[in-house]
Every structure is written in structure tokens, then in C-alpha cells.
Image (spheres, rainbow, N blue to C red):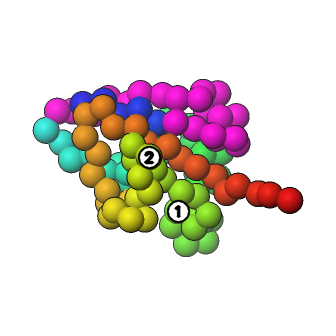
């Protein structure tokens, strides 16, 4: 099973990529949370510090996740299941002025 992950702004700098395709064993449940754990293993401390709150260990509230263009907040959050070929976008906060 393959899931593409799209990175924006700071995460592009951390990963050195705009997009990456991750492979998971067939038949295994893949969630947004599982993808984040895989990316944490791959990119280490810098990724963890950007995505997770250092005190609570929870994903920082300002980061949004879109699966095929749909916000996971309208789905099942980090427990949102992904299917083969899905695209997960990790969106940082957008500032204006």
C-alpha cells in the first residue's frame, strides 16, 4: 500500500522534499497517526519538534491534515484511515497581514 505525503514550508526544509511516497504492508490499517510515526522515525528530532507539543506529546493544534483535500477534522482526526493511493497533506498555519 502506498500513501503520498505532501510537505509545505518548514516541513519542506526539514525533509528536503515537497512530497514523499511511503509504503506500508498490504492488509495493515494505516492512519494519519501511523504515517506521522513513520515520518518521525525517518526525520527525527526536527520533525518531532515541529509537529508535536514537547510538553503534552500531542500533535500541535495549529497543524492541519488533509486527506485527498478533505480536512481530517471533519473525518476522524489522527485516526482517519488511509487507502492505497491517498494523498496526505501536512499544512502549517497560514499567516496574513
Residue 52 image-quadrant placement: bottom right
Q: Residue at x 58, y 38 (%)?
A: 7
Percent from the top left, x then y, of residue 63? 58, 58
Q: Is residue 20 magenta?
A: yes
Q: Is residue 64 left or right of residue 85?
A: right
Dot 2: what SS? loop
Q: Residue furthest left?
A: 27
**Residue highlighted by disc 2:** 69
Q: Residue at x 40, y 37 (%)?
A: 87
Q: Where the N terminus falls, by quadrant?
A: top left
Q: Where 87 falls versus 79 (above or below)?
A: above
Q: Where the C terminus falls, by quadrant?
A: bottom right
Q: Where 54 falls versus 24 (above or below)?
A: below
The answer to which of 20 and 85 lies nearer the viewer is: 85
**Residue highlighted by disc 1:** 59
Q: Alpha-carbon neighbours of circle 2 within 10 Å: few (<14), some, or many (≥20)?
A: few
Q: Alpha-carbon neighbours of circle 1 within 10 Å: few (<14), some, or many (≥20)?
A: some
Mark-to-mark CA distance, 2 and 1? 20 Å
Q: Which residues are magenta?
A: 6-26
Percent from the top left, x then y, of residue 39? 48, 40
The answer to which of 27 and 86 lies nearer the viewer is: 86
Q: Residue furthest bottom?
A: 56
Q: Is residue 34 left or right of residue 48?
A: left
Amino acid at each position: 500500500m502506498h500513501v503520498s505525503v505532501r510537505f509545505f514550508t518548514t516541513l519542506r526544509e526539514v525533509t528536503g522534499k515537497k512530497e514523499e511516497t511511503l509504503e506500508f504492508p498490504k492488509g495493515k490499517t494505516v492512519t494519519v497517526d501511523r504515517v506521522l510515526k513513520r515520518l518521525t522515525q525517518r526525520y527525527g528530532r526536527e520533525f518531532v519538534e515541529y509537529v508535536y507539543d514537547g510538553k503534552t506529546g500531542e500533535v500541535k493544534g495549529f497543524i492541519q491534515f488533509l486527506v485527498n483535500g478533505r480536512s481530517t477534522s471533519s473525518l476522524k482526526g489522527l485516526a482517519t484511515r488511509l487507502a492505497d493511493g491517498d494523498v496526505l497533506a501536512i499544512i502549517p498555519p497560514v499567516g496574513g497581514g
